[in-house]
Image (cartoon, rainbow, N blue to C red):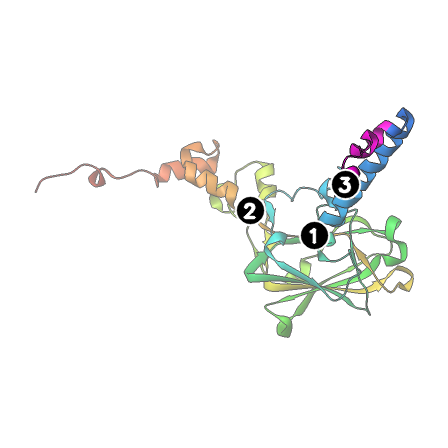
Amino acid sequence: MASGNRHSSHNVPEFLDAPADAEDLLSEDDQEVAGELLEEDEDVAEEDEEGVVDPAAQPDQQSMPPAPPPGLKEISPLASWTVSSSKPGCGVAALRAPNTALFWQSDGPQPHLLNIHFFKLVEIVGMRVYLNFDLDESYTPTLIRFAAGTGYNDLQEFSTLQKQQPNGWLEVDFEDVGEVEPADGDDDEMKDDSEEEKENTRRLPVLRCMLVQVRICENHQNGKDTHLRGLQLFARDSSKMQERMDAGVSAMPATAGAERMRKKKIFEVPAWATVPSLR
């Protein structure tokens, strides 16, 4: 018992009771270096948790795609996109990102296929792709074929794009699409509108389909894999015309077409429909 009491009566030194803080044992310069290392470790830990940082989060102004042509709206986000092959990190997500610094890179035999599936029948009136020979060189497509249909069984080729050293956004030729329809508002009442209105309501070929297939058949210098940095599909934008119709003829510009519509009085309510009468 006595020996136990003697052991318990020993005093523990204060420096063992309360260990000193690590910062107190470092000089000011060493503390700054340690702080920078801790910040780097925290950044690495955040990237490990969130995955690879997406460079498309803040694209610069030059890599942003241009606005749709006048009178058209982009319908690319309405579709489901699939590719025949891709390198890790260079798949559909990179192609669909609003940043031409990113790209889809194939990883398989030619032709390399990009399938754009819509869930219902759409009317496409414009299409463009972004290629960059200066950056991609042998990965740059030089021959692209475009086909469309309601499914894989009835695909029909409607256009071909062939360039040796393409750079920038390239319009897909719709000359062989066939049927031509007027855009919204291109009627007799709009014939006397301004030149800008006529341009916005120009007659456009309409490609009706549910599936668009992009076939990259050849690359520069017989390259195997390919880079495609952007692709957009457009339909007619009827929102402006609808707004004008909702506002009524009185809100239309003072043109001869609008004057003819006012004379027709198609927006006036007849008196018999508003004034009750007793019989």
Q: Identify the residue at horizontal 77%, vertical 52% (top origin).
A: 229
- As rendered, which of 37 and 181 lies closer to the eye? 37
Label 3 or label 1, whichever comes before in sequence order: 3
Q: Identify the residue at horizontal 89%, vertical 54% (top origin).
A: 137
Q: Do the CB atoms of the residues marked 1 and 2 lie less than 8 Å apart?
A: no
Q: Residue 55 carries which label?
A: none
Instruction: Name, please, the residue furthest toward the left.
Output: 279
Q: In which quarter of the image is residue 107?
A: bottom right
Question: To which residue does mark 2 refer?
Answer: 237
Question: To which residue does mark 1 refer?
Answer: 96
Secondary structure type for disc 2: loop
Label 1 or label 2, whichever comes before in sequence order: 1
Q: Identify the residue at horizontal 85%, vertical 27% (top origin).
A: 24
- As rendered, which of 275 and 65 lies closer to the eye? 65
Amino acid type, callout 2? Asp
Amino acid type, callout 3? Ala
**Is residue 62 at least partly visible in the picture?**
no
Q: Quadrant of residue 41?
A: top right
Label 2 or label 3, whichever comes before in sequence order: 3
Residue depth check, mark 3 versus mark 1: number of the one nearer the observer: 3
Q: Is residue 224 above or below residue 36?
A: below
Alpha carbon separation for disc pair 2 and 3: 98 Å
Q: Give the range drawn in magenta.
A: 1-24
Question: To which residue does mark 3 refer?
Answer: 2
- Tell me if residue 227 is in the magenta stretch: no
Q: In which quarter of the image is residue 275?
A: top left
Secondary structure type for disc 3: helix
- As rendered, which of 196 and 109 lies closer to the eye? 109
Residue 62 appears at what percent x and percent y? Answer: 77, 39
Amino acid type, callout 1? Arg
- Tell me if residue 7 is in the magenta stretch: yes
